[in-house]
Amino acid sequence: MNGPKIPKNTDQSGSPRQQLARPSAQQLVVGSGRGEFDLIAQYFAPLAGPGAFDLGDDAALLTPVPGEQLVFTADAIIAGVHFLTDDPADTVALKLLGVNLSDLAAMGARGVGYLITTAWPHDLDERWIADFAQGLGRGQGRYNVELLGGDTVATHGPLSLSLTAVGAVPTGQALRRNGAQLGDRIYVSGRIGDGGVGLQILRDGLPGGAAADRQAAIERYRAPEPRLALGTALRGVASACIDVSDGLVADLGHLAEQSGARMAVELAQVPLTPLADLIGGSVAAITAGDDYELLFTAPADAEEQVRAAGRKADTAITCIGSVSARQSAGQGVELYDERGQTVVLDRPGYRHF
């Protein structure tokens, strides 16, 4: 896939909206004779950005803004592994876009565009593709990014989707994982555990909790919100940063490893989903993953700057601990309960292998 911007109209909220054609009754199955270029022209060319040449060339062209560095990240999601096979197509698109843009947020970058590779099962109903493209269009308007290109193929395996996001950050201002220093405070945005609860509600029919909280958890699982505004606000403030995808403890462990530091977390200070008890309490919530909040460190004397960044991004921020030691004392994460006792975990978070 690879185009001049298609004219947009506006929805009732004032947000940009692309017009994407719906399939006719004769165009329902990917393997029914519809060609690759027909699908691209109908569903994805309307999403193309200015450098993508109507998705008609081999690649897109980007001209970097002077004084900025480009940031690249890629993530893949597979039906039955990273999303449920009956998840609505538009939310799958929002999830695919959101998890990649979350990586840009963790680097303090703004979104520029993305490339997408789709492997459609031969028996996939084409209406699913139409709804998926609609979801991408909504995400583009929400996060100010545009499609740059990619590839589309058919497969006999499960539905597989891969997205490469492109961002930009002022030269030398990217947030990294390796800057945490002794005495820094540890902060997390939003709240932790909603994604894990949402998955168990959808997959296992998990009962209990208020209806509004259950719906919020489902939405967080299906369509995570990348903290792009917070990431850019943390430039020059955070000493190290990562997004929470595999679980708070597991991802904080990556910060500890890259920074050569030991992190001490007060479990009672972690802002949790109100439904944490449904999945086994705070320990289950902080190891569940799929939260896509920003987890970062900052110097102790930068607390007001951290709070100001949260206000600017309209995002709650909570201090959950501190960097307790440097490399000579070892690396990793230590959890403490309200009595100051060490909490031992069976596993720190989601494992891909």
Image (spheres, rainbow, N blue to C red):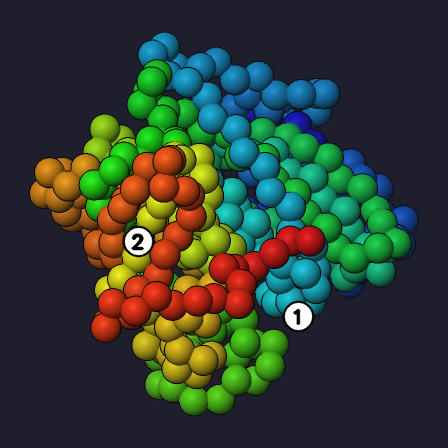
Relative vertical location of residue 298 with respect to residue 90 in this rendering, above or below = above
Q: Residue at x 56, y 59 (%)?
A: 350
Tag 2's secondary structure?
A: strand
| Disc on res. 230 | none
Q: Residue at x 60, y 42 (%)?
A: 75
* Residue at mark 1: 86
The quarter holding residue 59 reads top right
Q: Amino acid at mark 1?
A: Asp
Tag 1's secondary structure?
A: loop
Nearest to the observer: residue 227 or residue 11: 227
Q: Is residue 148 left or right of residue 1?
A: left
Q: Amino acid at mark 2?
A: Ala
Q: Which residue ends up furthest to the bottom in the rendered image? A: 208
Relative vertical location of residue 147 with respect to residue 53 in this rendering, above or below = below
Residue 279 visible here:
yes
Q: Where does residue 293 sit, x and y in percent of width and height?
A: 37, 53
The quarter holding residue 164 reads top right
Q: Residue at x 60, y 49 (%)?
A: 133
Q: Is residue 48 left or right of residue 299?
A: right
Q: Residue at x 47, y 79 (%)?
A: 279
Q: Is residue 330 left or right of residue 14?
A: right
Residue 222 visible here:
no
Nearest to the observer: residue 130 or residue 186: 186
Q: Residues within 10 Å of mark 1 (few under 14, many from 20)?
A: few
* Residue at mark 2: 264
Q: Which residue ends up furthest to the top in the rendered image? A: 66
Q: In which quadrant will I find the N terminus?
A: top right
Q: Where does residue 89 sit, x and y in percent of width and height?
A: 62, 60
- Of mark 1 and mark 2, the one earlier in the sequence is 1
Nearest to the observer: residue 40 or residue 106: 106
Q: Where does residue 236 sit, x and y in percent of width and height?
A: 23, 28
The span from disc 1 to disc 2 (Cα, nearest Å) is: 40 Å
